[in-house]
Image (spheres, grey):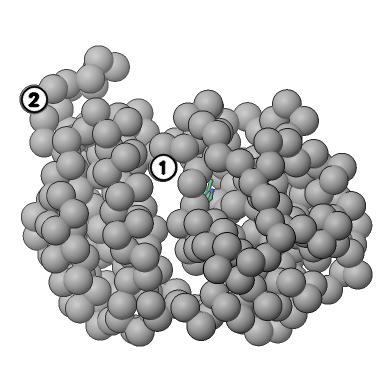
Amino acid sequence: PDTAWVNGRFLPLADASVSVLDRGFLFSDSVYEVIPVYAGTPFRMDDHLQRLARSLDALGIADPHGIDGWRALLAELVEVNGGGDLAIYLQVTRGAPSRRDHRIPHDVEPTVVAFCQTRAAPDPEALAAGLAAITTDDTRWRDCHIKSTSLLANVLAADAARAEGATEAILVRDGAVLEGTSSNVFAVIDGRLVTPALRPTILPGITRGVVLGIARAQALDHAEVDTLTPEALRAAEEVWITSSTREIFPVTRLDGASVGDGVPGPLWTRVRGWLQAGLHD
Ligand code: PLP
């Protein structure tokens, strides 16, 4: 996939660029989405586009395309990139005024960038092993429900995980587990599936919503909880992370100790099966 869309035209990704005065570059004045594509078909595209609309609205950026415009544009983007299994990345910035100035300009056109990356299905061996995670202090700002490109705290926390031989950092604020640096968090505690209830410091993940939909449809004992402590997470029978690119991934080591038996749990196996069955809906 080597064709990008920048401000109204397709061009080779290697040649795609934006101005150094772009406010996305200078101030992270910008929002984004990542939409998984299975065999050429975007999964839950409308949910992603509705979240994009909410993110743009929160920043007061006019939606440059609208839902139907986005649908048409992304369908074409997938097609020119050959379809198959992809992840669409799209970003809308406030735009590029003629000078750097903190004050928001109200007369610029948003910058729109979209491109695709290959998306491999989670490797069966990696899934069977599960991943290692750490818990760490959440130093992000307080409006993480907006999918903005202000991701510095996320990337530094993810790198702290890497430095400890782990793959994901689970962010904790005021004694409560919130989410991963690029994922939502689920746990099985006393047989019940729990996830932190949405609040401004949690991104309403599309995959999180899909998993909760499965829990409802299958009448699983489940709850969105106000406070999931890191201690309760470490003592859980199962821990999972969810995201559009990782689907539902089992966490088998947390803060250097095994989660449950240290292997993906039985509820994960069942919920993953249901998710897989619905991925082409
Ligand atoms: N939380 C954060 C901070 C994320 O960056 C992401 C996705 O990258 C998620 C949660 C999961 O969201 P989704 O399932 O919509 O991919």
Residue located 55% across and 40% down the image: 198
* Residue closest to the eye, 107 or 224: 224
Left or right of 108? Residue 228 is right
Residue under numbered circle 2: 107
Q: Closer to us: mark 2 or mark 1?
A: 1
Give the residue at x 71% y 71%: 268
**Would you say 265 lies left or right of 241 here?**
right
Residue 152 seen from this side: no
Question: Helix or strand or loop: what does disc 2 sit on?
Answer: loop
Q: In this view, does 79 lie above or below 68?
A: below
| SS assignment at label 1 | loop
Q: How crowded is mark 2: few (under 14 residues within 10 Å), some or many (20 or more)?
A: few
Quadrant location, the C terminus: bottom left
Residue 10 locus on image (x, y percent) = 13, 64
Percent coordinates x, y for residue 95 in the rendering? 19, 35
Q: In which quarter of the image is residue 193?
A: bottom right
Q: What is the C-alpha distance between the residues marked 2 and 1?
A: 23 Å
Q: In this view, does 128 lie to the left or right of 184?
A: right
Question: At label 2, which amino acid type do we have?
Answer: Asp
Name the image quarter holding the N terminus: bottom left
198 versus 87 height, above or below: above
Q: What residue is disc 1 on?
A: 147
Q: Which residue is drawn at 23% across and 53% down?
A: 113
* Residue type at the position of mark 1: Lys
The quadrant in which residue 34 appears is bottom left
Q: Does the residue labelled 1 lie within 8 Å of ligand 1?
A: yes
Q: Position of residue 211 (x, y in %)?
A: 56, 63
